[in-house]
């Protein structure tokens, strides 16, 4: 929880991550961060504490809140500084967008990625790098890729979950919401993150989890149960998520309450609303698959594009695992907004390419509707898709773990200190390794992996795939 005492500890240090993560998320304090000046205000009902910033003053004078966005009728050109400044001059959940970047190095020997014993070729990880100097002095005798360590943002609220909720919680608070309804799998990191953030703000969360209650509560399922109100939904009923979410929201609201949807809030450009007597319930889609969630990813892209980090001119192959696909779409929009030569490769895990294409089209359409109609979004190349959707190297039904993958996660953890899971982040790790070996580095391109967190899900997998995890006890290197 951010406090007045911890405010002064906020710093932006090159590629360093603060040891104390408790100040990265604020509770009842409100953070208004102006991306143009890296400055912050903390507001309470009784006082305004100024840290530093002239640009944030301008944001306040122009009445930028979590609900005031670019006028969609203006058609501001995507990539223009005016558009980006107006889009990001708002309140955020994260006090700042900072994150750590590490470099993973491995042997240049060509690796058959279908043989996961090849993970022993990883040489290690460099956590103390200066990006510009490191890029210029890269030794191509050993392959490497960079990894954005968003898994270190917070013990429970990390990875893309933190980024997607970055712009969501202030909007919820501005509209006097009392209850939040969302859904996800039994080990949903999104559901757990939502529950924690709501509890910190005195909001009630209602989590609809797919399937049956496990015999033992572990991982994100345990966190969801501790911080929120969990209801298990049979898989056949959960298949119609929209109907289930609406029914639960109506039930929570009761006769005297009301149900809010992000589309309605953003369309009406409501300002800060007075608290009503009845419950005000808002629905967050599965995995925060809403247009408002894209803003946190765009904010991250702007941070990473600074000259002392990834910069604006280097060709970058950005790799991310895709559940709902929202993260990949947000990263791509951010790169397009800034005119960056970045290609986002998303490893499809939970759907087929047609489903991800529909999600991409829907979120871009909602983004244009609520945040403006940038002219660049009318280009044929954009209409044809802004994300490079690819299959996982070893395909399978979503949620399945294949032989050797748990051991691969162990090898990676022991040799790099980075924890990945076999469902999500291992898929992106494989792809980043593949791209590094298959020509991206030869072309002078950087391969950058976004660690999406979610590693507490390993506890649930250990219950489901006992034999794979029991084998770890018998492994002799």
Image (cartoon, rainbow, N blue to C red):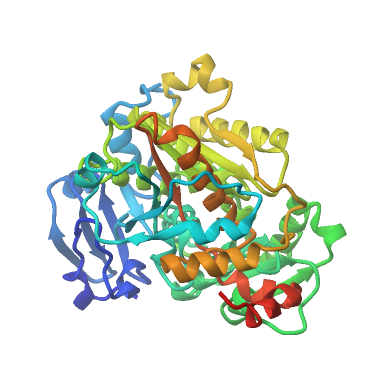
Q: Quadrant of residue 86?
A: top left
Quadrant of the frame with the N terminus? bottom left
Image point 46% across, 64% down: which residue? 158
Image-based side of 213 in relation to 357, left or right: right
Image point 50% across, 73% down: which residue? 196
| 398 over 48 or under it: above or below | above
- Which of the two residues, 283 or 421, is positioned nearer the viewer here? 421
Image-based side of 97 in relation to 179, left or right: left
Residue located farthest toward the right when viewing the structure as drawn: 236
Number of callouts: 0
Image point 62% across, 37% down: which residue? 390
Quadrant of the frame with the C terminus? bottom right
Is residue 257 something that shows in the picture? no
Tell me residue 447's x, y (percent): 41, 41
Q: Quadrant of residue 354?
A: top right
Is residue 343 something that shows in the picture? yes
Tell me residue 77's x, y (percent): 36, 21
């Amino acid at each position: 929880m951010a406090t007045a005492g911890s405010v002064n500890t906020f710093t932006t240090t090159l590629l360093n991550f603060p040891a104390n993560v408790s100040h990265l998320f604020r509770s009842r304090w409100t953070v208004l961060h102006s991306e143009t000046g890296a400055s912050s205000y903390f507001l309470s009902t009784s006082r305004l504490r100024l840290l530093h910033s002239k640009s944030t003053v301008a944001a306040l004078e122009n009445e930028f809140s979590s609900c005031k966005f670019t006028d969609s009728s203006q058609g501001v050109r995507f990539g223009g500084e005016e558009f980006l400044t107006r889009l990001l001059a708002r309140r955020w959940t994260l006090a700042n967008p900072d994150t750590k970047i590490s470099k993973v190095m491995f042997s240049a020997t060509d690796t058959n990625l279908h043989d996961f014993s090849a993970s022993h070729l990883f040489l290690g990880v460099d956590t103390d790098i200066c990006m510009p100097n490191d890029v210029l002095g890269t030794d191509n005798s050993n392959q490497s890729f960079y990894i954005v360590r968003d898994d270190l943002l917070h013990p429970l609220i990390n990875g893309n979950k933190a980024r997607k909720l970055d712009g969501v919680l202030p909007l919820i608070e501005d509209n006097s919401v009392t209850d939040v309804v969302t859904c996800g799998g039994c080990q949903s990191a999104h559901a757990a993150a939502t529950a924690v953030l709501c509890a910190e703000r005195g909001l009630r969360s209602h989590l609809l989890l797919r399937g049956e209650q496990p015999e033992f509560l572990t991982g994100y399922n345990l966190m969801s149960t501790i911080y929120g109100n969990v209801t298990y939904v049979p898989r056949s009923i959960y298949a119609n998520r929209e109907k289930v979410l609406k029914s639960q929201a109506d039930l929570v609201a009761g006769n005297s309450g009301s149900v809010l949807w992000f589309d309605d809030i953003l369309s009406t450009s409501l300002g800060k609303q007075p608290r009503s007597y009845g419950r005000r319930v808002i629905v967050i889609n599965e995995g925060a698959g809403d247009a408002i969630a894209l803003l946190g990813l765009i904010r991250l892209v702007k941070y990473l594009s600074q000259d002392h980090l990834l910069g604006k001119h280097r060709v970058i192959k950005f790799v991310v695992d895709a559940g709902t696909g929202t993260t990949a779409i947000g990263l791509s929009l951010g790169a397009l907004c800034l005119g960056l030569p970045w290609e986002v490769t998303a490893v499809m895990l939970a759907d087929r390419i047609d489903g991800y294409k529909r999600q991409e089209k829907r979120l871009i359409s909602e983004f244009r509707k609520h945040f403006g109609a940038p002219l660049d979004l009318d280009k044929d190349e954009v209409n044809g898709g802004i994300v490079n959707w690819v299959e996982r190297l070893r395909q399978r039904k979503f949620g399945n773990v294949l032989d050797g993958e748990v051991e691969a996660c162990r090898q990676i953890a022991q040799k790099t200190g980075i924890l990945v899971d076999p469902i999500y982040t291992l898929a992106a790790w494989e792809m980043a390794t593949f791209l590094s070996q298959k020509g991206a580095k030869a072309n002078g391109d950087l391969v950058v992996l976004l660690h999406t967190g979610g590693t507490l899900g390993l506890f649930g997998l250990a219950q489901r795939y006992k034999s794979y995890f029991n084998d770890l006890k018998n492994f002799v290197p």
